[in-house]
Structures are given as structure tokens and as C-alpha cells.
Image: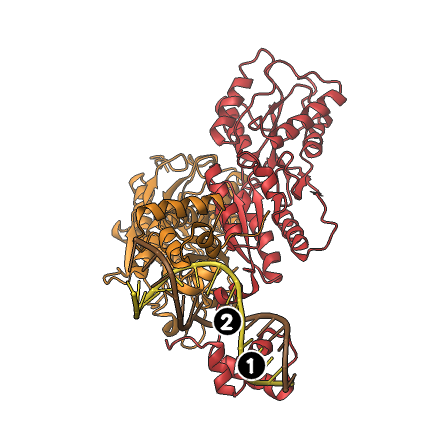
Chain colours: A red, B orange, C yellow, D brown
Amino acid sequence: MTTRAKIKDIAASVGVSPATVSRALTGTGLVAEPTLSRIREAARDMNYRPNVSARNLRTQRSMSVLMVVRDVGNPFYLEILKGVESTARAAGYAVLMGNTENNPEREIEYFDMLRDGHADGMILITGKLPKRDGFAERIRNLPVVVALEAINGSGLPHVMIDNEGASREAVQHLIGLGHRRIAHIAGPVPEIMSLRRRDGYRRAMEDAGLPVPEGYEPVGDYLLHTGERLCRQLFELPEPPTAIFVANDEMAFGAINELRRMGLDVPRDVSVVGFDDLFLSQAFHPPLTTVSQPRAAIGQKAMELLLHVFSGEPGVPETVEMPTELKLRGSTAPLPTNS
Amino acid sequence: MTTRAKIKDIAASVGVSPATVSRALTGTGLVAEPTLSRIREAARDMNYRPNVSARNLRTQRSMSVLMVVRDVGNPFYLEILKGVESTARAAGYAVLMGNTENNPEREIEYFDMLRDGHADGMILITGKLPKRDGFAERIRNLPVVVALEAINGSGLPHVMIDNEGASREAVQHLIGLGHRRIAHIAGPVPEIMSLRRRDGYRRAMEDAGLPVPEGYEPVGDYLLHTGERLCRQLFELPEPPTAIFVANDEMAFGAINELRRMGLDVPRDVSVVGFDDLFLSQAFHPPLTTVSQPRAAIGQKAMELLLHVFSGEPGVPETVEMPTELKLRGSTAPLPTNS
DNA sequence: ATGAAAGCGCTAACAT
DNA sequence: ATGTTAGCGCTTTCAT
């Protein structure tokens, strides 16, 4: 490994000034044809690569974006990352991944990275901001786009799905199958996303004139075992449900496993609908009927929004809503007429 | 957002030279106590953050590492990333994620990023290197660590599991349950990892004096539907197996679903063992008996190896082997004695 | 169309 | 213990 070639080396080798080499290689200024080719050739021969630190220092941009999630270990975010990444790459940006683990300190660290020049912009998928005084104001004009979960009153552009509408559709599907005793296992309830999904459930029930009995809306935390526990709880009620709309797939898996343990068959005895359409939802038994989110498209859109912000052009939309799709699979069935 | 404070501004405000400020803030040189505190205070007041481009340009390091996988969408890599990330952070490094999608061109791009100064080192989890002439030689001395899959003859340090030993143990478990007709659904076979797992299967069979009949080693590609297809194929053989060792969980899910479709019960009629211990393997029905890899620990170890390389100290081990664990769950059962 | 020169913000010799 | 100075590699005025 010889020492790295610098722009000066190319200049010397071709017999021009460093400035000309820079112009030729960045394609910005005009360089005459005989010189241009010779410079490009020399660069290739010498295996030249521009030093990003030097370039970034000079141009005051890093050509990187930061995507911050609350848990890198969650496969859900990966498809979003894919969408972000491909769009970013196409525009010449690298993507850095950040992981907050729900720790506000770490969120702040990532905002700091933005200010450090580590990245030119950020895509936040964390559902909340650090509760520092004046934090929301301080970041209002930072190049940040929020994905997946709204952040109350942050004023930042965000790309979302219609959680309430999608939930309503899911519950309407159950109602259409003849179910009347439909329960909802909710997500962690102070969070906007969980509330929206529960709103959708309530709305569908109300529209159909169906009651939501006491105990039909247990609150969970999106984790497998909680799905099991809350499902058991539902079936200890005097009038257990015949169908459950669960706020995410992971808890839905738990619920289905618990039903099986209780000797109930899904979908014959109980119908279950999830939300997310995880990688394995169709491999599950029974294949899960669930709300599918266009994850890659959400990532793509978020990155497009960020590029729009970068461009400095006006008219960045504050909210972009992406369509969802209710995937009808094997975990839902008509209510037997004699039930 | 006022304009960003620079080191010069702090120097002016405190009444010292920029060099002193730098020394105080980096903690490197000794700065006397009255000055030190005043500088720190001023930095905090002015909300100072060092410009990374400038620092990197000067120090010739980026304090970032690159973790490159072949598919960010695969949840399997996430736990590894977690291990890498926490270790990297503790050492002051940021982690960049790269995604090759099995495209050699993109792999080369990431190697280029290393040379660009984008990152100081790289953790590769791709199982192969671009087949450029002389590529292996060119990178031999680069700060690169390979994780999870060996790269034949790359000479790079790598952290692995004992694929052969773990597979052997898995098959021995089936043998111990009384199974004799044991098949193996393999991974893509030119790849080392698949070969090792198959070797482990063969070794266990041979040690037990069991035959591997024609057609008992179909070759797959780690995908769900392939698991289904190859499983069906196995049961079209004159003597179908009573147990299957599948090279990864995803194909194992497919196999189990296919068995159910064929009216066979797992584990009553057929036992199935997987490899990976995915997030949902214990939520699956039946819960999958499988080989668990210490993913976070693998990531952590890989990063530690990279830090060792950075340190310039000798004695970087070429291979580190991490322990696996066979998780006994519900997809395996003793062979009925009258079978 | 090309060159000369300055400077992005920081750190590290070298001096004192 | 602190200041002076130079320079990391690049891009970009400003000349010509």
C-alpha cells in the first residue's frame, strides 16, 4: 500500500495546478478537453480518492445523513432504513445509523452530531424529543425529518401512515365477518401512535353501534409476552371476545400462542388481526391478517423530504401520509352463525 | 440559531490562545487550573462543539467505523450491530452502516470509503470479497475485521462460530432422540458457512453409523419458500426422514409449515431443528429447537478486534471463535418406538 | 481555460 | 503552562 495520492500529486504528474485538477474531478468548473482526460486518467492511475475531511471542511457539508431509531435491534426499522439508504445514495449521501435505546441523553448526542458537522441532516424515528427546556424551539430550524411517529408540536416535517384509518379498516373487516364482541390490545398509551390506533378501533365500533365492554381495551407495550398475558386476561372476562384487534404483530403472535394454549383455534374460535406486517407474519401459523405499512416507501419519502429541506426551496410539506394495506390472511374467519 | 462558536471565539472570550483552548478541551496537554475551568465554562456557555471535519483533517482519523452487511433488511444482522455499536461508542467511535445487497460494486465502494477517510476501519459481514484481481492482496493491511462468515484466504482477522461443531451437536440431539432417518436442508453450497454446517451434519451421521441416503441433502438458499419446497421434496422420497436439520431458521419455518400442510405434526411425526435462533423462533408454533448464535457478543468481539488493530499493538488473533448454544424447544421429540 | 493564493477549523511542533 | 506558527487536503475567489 503506497502512500495516498493527493490532488497535488496529480497536478504535478499532469503538469497543471491543483485548482485545475479539482475542477476537472468535481466536474464543476470548465476544463478544456485535452487536459480533462489527462487529469482523469492520472487520477485513475494513481488510484486517487478525495479526502472527505478536507472536502467537508472546505465545503462545510458532510454529504451524510443520520437516521436515528430507538432500537436498532428492531427489524421493523430496517426496511425503512433500506428506503432511506437507497434514496440517500442516489443523491450522493451516506447514511449513518444512530440508536437511542429510548435514552434522551443519547438523542441529544445525535442532535449534537448534527451540529458537529457529522451529518447534514437527520431522520428521526423515535416518537419523542428530549424534554429539555426549549429543546423543541432550538431544533425547529434544523434539517430534521420525522418518520413513522408524529412528535407532538415539534413543527418538524414528518411522514406518517394513517394509524387511525388503518385501524378502523382492520376492525371493520372483523365486523364484516360478523364479529360483535371485538377487543383491542393497545400499545403503550401515552404515545400518539397507540392512541391513534385505539381511536380507530373505537371509531369502527361506534360506527357499527357495537359496545366496548369494560376490560376490552387492555394496554400493552408491543412485546410478545405482553400479548400473551393480555390475551389471557381478555378470556377471563365474563364475556370474552370472539375477535381481537392487536396494535402490533408481535403482541398478536403472543395472543395467538396463548389462545392455542387455552385450547382455542385461530381463526375458527377467535379471529386475530395485527398491525405491522412483520417479516415473519406470513410464515406464522396461521398466517397473520394484518395492516401492512409501506416501510421502504416511508423511508424513501422521509429522505426525499430531507433532500427537499437541503435544497432550500420552499414548500416542504409538514405532513406526508403514506397508504397502508390490510393483508387478509389466515388468522381471521367469519363468526360461526350459532355463536 | 446563532452562528456556531469556533475555538477562536472561545480563545478570544477567555483571553487565551486557540492552542490552549484546544488543549483544555481535548484533555491532552496540561492546562493550569484557573484557565482550565474558565475555558470549559466558556465552551459550555457558547454551546461549543468542535467541527469534526477540521479535527479529522488535522488528526487524520475519523473516529468512525463502517459495518457492512449484505442486507440491512435482515434482522439477523441487527443484534450484531448492537454489539458493535455499544463497543464502538464506549471507545468513542461512531458506526456507519453499509449495505451491499450482494453487489460487488457496492462492496468496493465501501472499501473506497475507508480510503476516503470516511471511516477508520470496517467490519465486514458479507461472506465474500469482490473478485477483482489482486483485491485480496490490496486489502490485506487495511483495518478490516470479518464477522460471522469466513472469507477464504483473505488473511483478515475474523470472529466466527463453530458452524460444524454446532451442527454436529444439533444432529446428535436428533440421534439421541432415536431418529435414524435424518435429512439436512443445506444453505447455498458454494459458501463456506453452508459447507461447514453440512459437514457437521455428515460428521454426526457418520459417527453414529447412520447412512445419508440419496436426496437427503437438498441445497437451499436460506429463504422461507425454499424451505417449503425442499421439505416437500424430501417427503416424496421412497424413505422420507423422521427428522430434519435445517441450515437456518427461516427455511425451518417453511419446512414446518409445509409439513403441517401435508398433515404431519411437528414434533409428533417429524422433528425439526433450525439454526440462528431468530427473534421469532420461540414465538413460532411449535417453538423451534435451534442453534443460538451469540449475536451481540459476536459484534462486540469484532469491534474489540478492530480496536486492537487500531491500537497498533501486535498479537491480533486471526480467528476468534464464539460459543453457540443448542436451544431445546418444542419442535423436536423422541421417535416413537414403533416407527 | 488555467494559475495563485487564501482559508475552512482544528491540533501539534516548537518555542518561551 | 501558554503562545506562535504551520499545515492537514481541498475548493474557490480573484486574477490573468
Is A330 placed above or below B314 here?
above
Q: What residue type is labelled 1?
A: Arg
CA distance for labels 1 and 2:
13 Å
Work out which quarter of the rendered image holds the N terminus of chain A and state it.
bottom left
Q: Residue A82 carries which label?
A: none
* Within-10-Å neighbours for mark 2: few <14, some 14–19, many 20+: some
Describe residue A86's horizontal placement relative to residue B190 as left or right: right
Q: Which of C5 and A132 is in front in this view?
A: C5
Pick the quarter of the image with the C terminus of chain A.
top right
Q: Which chain carries label 2?
A: A
Residue found 60% across the figure and 52% down from its top: A83
Q: Tell us which disc is closer to us: 1 or 2.
A: 2
Which residue is at the far top? A238
* Residue at x 63% of width, y 27% of height: A195
| Earlier sequence position, callout 1 versus callout 2 | 1
Name the residue beneath numbered marker 1. Answer: A40
Q: Mark yes or no: residue A263 visible.
A: no
State the image coordinates of residue A137 (x, y, percent, origin top left). 61, 39
Q: Residues within 10 Å of mark 1 (few under 14, many from 20)?
A: some
Q: Which of A111 and B148 is in front in this view?
A: A111
Q: Residue at x 70, y 30 (%)?
A: A168
State the residue position of label 2: A50
Residue B39 lies, with reference to residue A10, above or below; the image says above
